[in-house]
Amino acid sequence: QEQVVESGGGLVQAGGSLRLSCTVSGMAADFDDYAMGWFRQAPGKEREGVSCISWSGANTYYADSVKGRFTIARDNDKNTLYLEMNSLKPEDTAMYYCAAAPSNGVGCGLTTLEYDYWGQGTQVTVSS
């Protein structure tokens, strides 16, 4: 059974940092057959794409709101995805979700419809 499990969320002051992790297991294919993404959803808002990374890690994409502050990475040997978040702002407060999409080649996308497997989320709260 597929499992996508996020960790690393918490409460942090504005300007601080957090590192999220996502481990994947039980998938039909190998971890490196999937593009991976991070999404977030704040109360009353739609889920939005934050960042994604291609199967090899060679290509990454970021939402404009997090460019220059967040860094996505993956370790295919450990079946793990990461999101390093720096210079956090109160508007970054949300539930953060990890998701996996069958790889279409070299890229990845930031739309929810592309992703087949989702974790339960980890809460990130940034206080002002």
Image (cartoon, grey):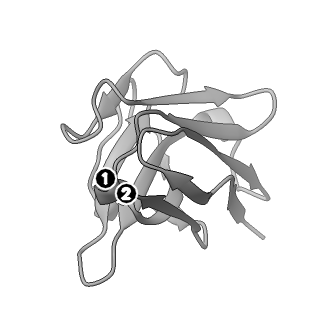
Q: Quadrant of the N terminus?
A: bottom right
Q: Which one is nearer the viewer's eye here, 121 or 101? A: 121
SS under mark 2:
loop
How many numbered callouts? 2
- Whether residue 38 appears in this view of the structure is yes
SS under mark 1:
strand
- Residue 49 is left or right of residue 85, and the answer is left
Q: List the single residue furthest toward the bottom.
A: 44
Q: Residue at x 50, y 43 (%)?
A: 36
Q: Name the front one of labels 1 and 2.
A: 2
State the image coordinates of residue 127 (x, y, percent, origin top left): 43, 60
Q: Residue at x 33, y 72 (%)?
A: 42
Classify 34 as above or below 11. Answer: above
Q: Which one is nearer the viewer's eye here, 12 or 94? A: 12
Q: Residue at x 40, y 34 (%)?
A: 87
State the image coordinates of residue 40 (x, y, percent, origin top left): 39, 61
State the image coordinates of residue 52 (x, y, percent, origin top left): 40, 38
Displayed quadrant of residue 44 = bottom left
List the residue tagged with mark 1: 49
- Residue 71 is left or right of residue 23, and the answer is left
Label 1 Cα crowd, 10 Å radius (few <14 / some 14-19 / many 20+):
many
List the residue tagged with mark 2: 128
Q: Which one is nearer the viewer's eye here, 36 or 92? A: 92
Label 2 Cα crowd, 10 Å radius (few <14 / some 14-19 / many 20+):
few
Displayed quadrant of residue 98 = bottom right
Closer to the N terminus: mark 1 or mark 2? 1
Q: Which one is nearer the viewer's eye here, 97 or 18? A: 18
Q: Residue at x 31, y 30 (%)?
A: 61
Q: Quadrant of the C terminus?
A: bottom left
Looking at numbered disc 1 in the image, what kind of residue is underneath it?
Answer: Gly
- Residue 17 is left or right of residue 51, and the answer is right
